[in-house]
Amino acid sequence: MTGRRTTARRASPAWPRLRYWFDTIVARGTAVLIGWLTLMCLAIVVPASAALVWARQDGPTTWSEQVVAVWVSVGQTLKIGGAVGRPLYVLMSVLLALVALLFVSTLVSLITNGLNDKVLALRRGRSTVLEARHTVLLGWSDQVFPIISELVEANSNRRRAVIAVLGPKDKAEMEDEIATAVGRLGHTRLICRSGVTTDPAVVSLVSPESARAVLVLTHEGEDGDAHVVKTLLAVDAAVRGRGTPAVVAAVRDGRHKRAADLAAGARGKVLDIEDVTARLIAQTSCEPGLSLVYQELLDFDGDEIYTVADPSLTGRTFGELLLAYDTSSVIGLLRRAGSEADEDADGTGRSRLELNPATDGVLGEGDRIVLITEDDDTATPATEPLPVDERAIVAPPRTPRPPERFLLLGWNHRAPLIIDQLDASVPPGSVLVVMAEGEEPLREADRCARAPGRRMHVEVHRGDITDPRVLDDLDVLSFDRAVVLGYDVRDTAPGALTGDDRTLVTLLHLRALEEAAGRDLAVVTEMTDDRSRLLAPAREGADFIVGGRLISLLMTQIAENRHLAAVFDSLFSADGDTIHLRPATEYVRPGHPVGFATVVESGRRRGHCVIGYRLHEAVAQGPSYGVRLNPDKRERLAFGPEDSVIVLAPGAGVTPHRERCRTVPRARGGGLPGRPPGRDDVPGGGW
């Protein structure tokens, strides 16, 4: 037995045994390790020093002199002096050299560790941001990339703009992802800090009290809205008594909006993602091309909405203001209800917004003009009156809008709200056909179809929208409008299509039907991922609604100008003044070249604010797809019978239904069922 063990031990490789021996020494502690290192050092240095002494041609010849020379070489190599003389002198020299060596080694170690700790802390993003008038982003999601892109564009005319991001990832990792997705930041400087956004002490790292705006990004997962509310409370605790930054946030479930509003405070603006998305889908279903108009308005690449103060126009009527600018389009007034100092101090929204007010309304002292222009410094009044061609203006048509047939393919928790908003906008007698599958979606759709007081008739059919036979039986191309919704993720079976995958397959079948029939169908498509939009088999310039990107653009606009929250609230409502695409022939004579000021004047006489146009011949040509917002009013063009004029005008404006089909969604993240009292009673309610 002993012979077997000896043979096995000898047969084992030497290198693993040596590593095991070294690991054992290291594990025994610092003192043992220092002893072994000292012995190993002496075992190498002493023989090497002796070899050097004996190899010298002019070296010492006697044994005593050689020993002294070896000692001097060892002392110089090990930095312990190597002094010679009396034994006490040599001993004290060695002792002082060892003390000096220990002190220097300790000092170097402390400096190295301190620098390493500082570099590690900076890499982890734990230092405080000492900035002012910067923009703070709290959280990390897909929203961060479009928001930073838009902020960079908005800051293109500002020097030393700063964006501070606080997220749960490593600082370097966040910087790399932003650099890859966004690219060059121009004049804007990016600062990333790492940490949880629900801890007030961590939120203080990005100095929210001195920021011009704080954006709280949506959080993934079932408890996403709860995380947003906790982050808003953390911001309030971090800035308490030290500042009042403008806060912008968004929640996915409308039931949590009231709590988020309370947590955001008086200067906070909270958006309801589902509500805003549903409203835009419904409006775009009635107005094909409307999503392109909102895309142009919401991003900072082109013309946006601004509020300007122009004392030189005080006393002018709103009708006169419509033609007071040649390169800006006026759409409303921001009435000053209190002193400017009071408003800026507390931010409680003392100003009152009037979007598309009566043409005889007068611009008062201290009021601001709401307009669409290229930048906040490009709104300058025209130097001379703009010409208007009276002969080209036509009388408004009196023909009522005929009923239309709508098709809704798919179902999700936004569908009931979309139907409510669509019902408030369509002509009476219109028909909506819903195609869905699954017990719960069909049950909700039937409840919507049975809601009393509807302007349109709702039919519900069971079927798989990815099955081409189902679409053939529906005679899809006989409808005037179609909406494709993505199902909520329910079916997790292998091979089951969910989300945008199902939507893409449905669009493939619709595109095949369009090509076979040789005609196009106005389709509005909802998607959850903006990258899926690039894969969509749809014609150029089609309407796509990506809720996450839409909210990102809205949050950025409101962060740059908090007054715009009221503007977009009105634009997305079903019973207020909203954006429409109307036939150009309802305003001016077709084929007759006119200046755009003539179109604006024609709209003014009907109580409409004309803000742009869309040319039919360019609907498939990117990047604008025929949409032109805020053209120069001196520009002359001849409109054809299929061209459209973009106007801000009153919506359908119907009496709210006594009973809506909006159902209580499933509780997410432990939320209480039901919506806040009074919310369902106001179709155009705030965000």
Image (tube, rainbow, N blue to C red):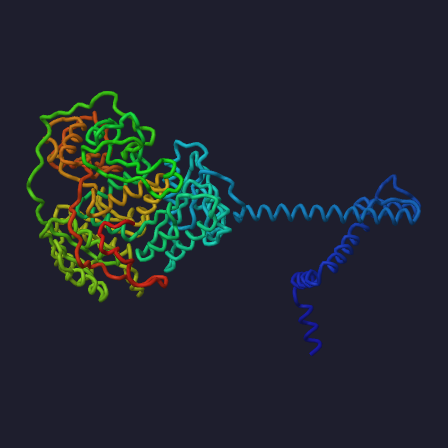
Q: Is residue 549 visible?
A: yes
Image quadrant in which you'd find residue 667? bottom left
Q: Which of 41/299 is in front? A: 299
Residue name at image x 18 percent, y 32 percent: 360
Residue 85 is drawn in which quadrant? top right
Q: Residue furthest left?
A: 399
The x, y position of residue 446, in whole percent, is 17, 63
Q: Residue at x 28, y 39 (%)?
A: 297
- Residue that sits furthest to the bottom in the current view: 1
In this rendering, the answer to whether 494 lies above or below 610 is: below
Q: Is residue 610 left or right of residue 556?
A: left
Is residue 70 visible in the rendered image? The answer is no
Q: Give percent across and percent down for residue 372.
A: 27, 34
Q: Return the x and y of residue 533 as percentages of the image width and height.
A: 28, 48
The quadrant of the picture occupied by the N terminus is bottom right
Q: Is residue 51 above or below residue 494?
A: above
View extreme (front): residue: 338
Q: Is 411 left, or right, of 351 in this rendering?
A: left
Q: Name the spot of residue 263 as percent of width and height, x first.
A: 39, 52
Number of numbered callouts drawn: 0
